[in-house]
Amino acid sequence: MSTSFNTPLHDPPVLPPEFGPQGPLLRRNSAVTESATVQWLLTGIALLFLLGFLLLPLVAVFSEALRNGWRVYVDALREPDALAAIRLTLLTAAIAVPLNMVFGIAAAWAITKFQFRGKTLLISLIDLPFSVSPVVAGLIYILVFGRHGWAGSWLSDHDIRIVFAVPGIIIATIFVTFPFVARELIPLMQEQGTDYEQASLSLGASGWQTFWRVTLPNIKWGLLYGVLLCTARAMGEFGAVSVVSGHIRGETNTMPLHVEILYNEYQFAGAFAVASLLAVFALVTLSLKSYLEWRHGDELAAQRKH
Amino acid sequence: MDIRIRGIKKSFGGFAALDGVDLDIASGELIALLGPSGSGKTTLLRGIAGLEFPDAGRIFFGDEDIARQPIRERRVGFVFQHYALFKHMTVLDNVAFGLRVRKRGERPPEALIRERSRELIALVQLDGLESRYPSQLSGGQRQRVALARALAIEPRVLLLDEPFGALDAKVRKDLRRWLRQLHDQTGYTTIFVTHDQEEALELADRVVVMNKGRIEQVGTTDEVYEKPATPFVFDFLGNTNVLRGEVRGRELFIDGQDVPIVTDAIHATGPVDVYVRPGDLRIADATAPGFEATIRGTQRTGPIVRCAAVAAGSGLPIEIEVPHLHYDTQLLRAGQSVRLRLNQFSIFARGAASANPTPRDAPILIGSERARGRLG
């Protein structure tokens, strides 16, 4: 094959990256923007709202937790029941999040890449945990797995404890957090369509290669975002877990439950200490997301979507 | 790789996208599938690629029936309408993809993959852009990356879905010519889908005109343009005037005129539709064979003068196109009565056909005629 063509192809010059859709090219057009007063007013309202409802409580949590000094704070966290609660919370998240990740990818894949009967039903079912009160979700598991529930006698015959034990907490957490990944991925994958997968298959890739090399890179930012939201919720879930947990100290208390118990017992320092740790987890999750976005900003811009 | 398609059928729900298609494509040919949207051309292309399995029928690559073979085993190069370049990969990685996903035993060493990819990138004239991402390329460049990526697997057949659809007019013309040269040089059997007749006629060795899931005609540019098999083909390939006429033996009377056009090709008797292009109507002498028309108005569009007129006998509207320096333009004034002759036309039997316009029942071509000696 030689490359001697008598029709040279002229391409228009490519704009430098700062003109790209993600670039920092800000256009100030006074004809179509609001007046300065309105801009300031809107920004002011948004900032005041954030300050009052988000930042102030966050500051309050930390200041309350540290009111009696570092020593009390650290002691409250090193107390065995608190440590058990932290361990249980992390364990729950470590099991629930990967499961929901796999489920979310599978559900989003099925919904966006295939046509089948009952698709709308599946989409509605995925949203169910968002619309059902977590307390009801907890009660459902009591009804199914509890001592007097449908599977109760079979479970007690085989000496399996689900309700008022760690498995119940994990199941309840999975229920409450399962829409996060799927909800994040479905619109993304819908928009991307099936052309990329078909192109990959036409080039001879197997289904597995297509998933790892084409689909996953295309959805990784959406997936990451979904996973982070899912993690935050899994660690913070209260309602459903509260119903199935049984509040056994040192055994079935997660961090949110532990906070509530301490608070009800007027141990404010301890309650706020654990609460501040939960807040730290949330902040770490958030900054992890921001860091990844910053670190892989180029790739993100190249994909134009995240 | 020569391709034979036999009795392909495919329906979506109740809609028959392909309704029994037979087609033979010789090795190394450049074929255009041409038709309006919903004609089944894209479904046929996707069927050949393996992106759709036909409900019935067989597709042969050489002697091998591949109608039920999944796409990844067919080794076809498919260029998607919107290219479907992998956004997270550079140009080089995109082109190398097909080689890198091969099974370990068949995969060339990485150095060879890179070399081969660079060759292809040079072939599509994108040297120096190997490390760009698709979002940093223009539309025409992306299209060529998609082409190089498809060629990397040394496909048995190259398939292009509306290859120029997403490009602007100037780039499209350049790329069309370039693709033709690339085809002549590489010799891949190539099939592309288009709804643009100009594109199909300019680029392809043979054009497959499709309508409602069936093939209306297969032929070279000259064949489909000068001897259209059905009124649909005539109509789809350009602007069309339809005149009423009647055939008696070898004499054709147009629009109730009493001076017939005498032809060699006509042998039927009865009412006919005469199809003629606006550019094939010219002003005739008063006694010459032809028909009378009244000019309604003229409009110059660039080098062409378009003229709206009405046939005197039937009152049907007709359109005439004349180059603006042509002698006739002086006579085409609004309100003027003129006598028109037909340089080239096709005649289709009129009758029950118009009530039931499926291709198989369409009026048969009685003849296509070209006036000798007086073209212009």
Image (cartoon, coloured by chain):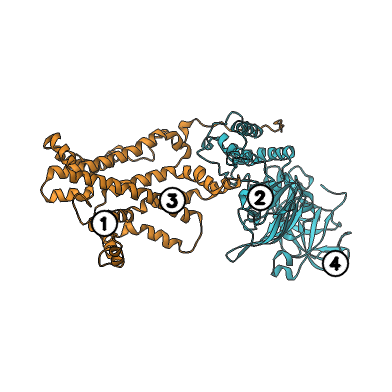
Alpha-carbon distance for marks 4 and 2? 37 Å
- The residue to which callout 4 is attached is B268
User: Residue at the top extreme?
Assistant: B128
User: Residue at the front extreme?
Assistant: A158
Mark 1 residue type: Ala
Nearest to the observer: residue A43 or residue A90? A90
Mark toward the start of the polypeptide (4 vs 2)? 2
- The residue to which callout 3 is attached is A105
Chain holding disc 3: A
Q: As displayed, is residue B131 above or below residue A138?
A: above
Same-subunit check for callouts 2 and 1: no
Circle on res. B219: none
- The residue to which callout 2 is attached is B193
Do the residues under discs 1 and 3 have CB atoms within 8 angstroms? no
Dot 1 lies on which element? Answer: helix
The x and y percentages for residue A244 are 25, 58
Same-subunit check for callouts 4 and 3: no
Q: As displayed, is residue A233 above or below residue A10?
A: below
Dot 2 lies on which element? Answer: strand
Mark 4 residue type: Ala
For the point 43% across and 50% down, the residue is A105
Number of marks in the image? 4
Task: Give the colour of chain A.
Answer: orange
Circle 3 residues within 10 Å: few <14, some 14–19, many ≥20: many
Circle on res. A240: 1
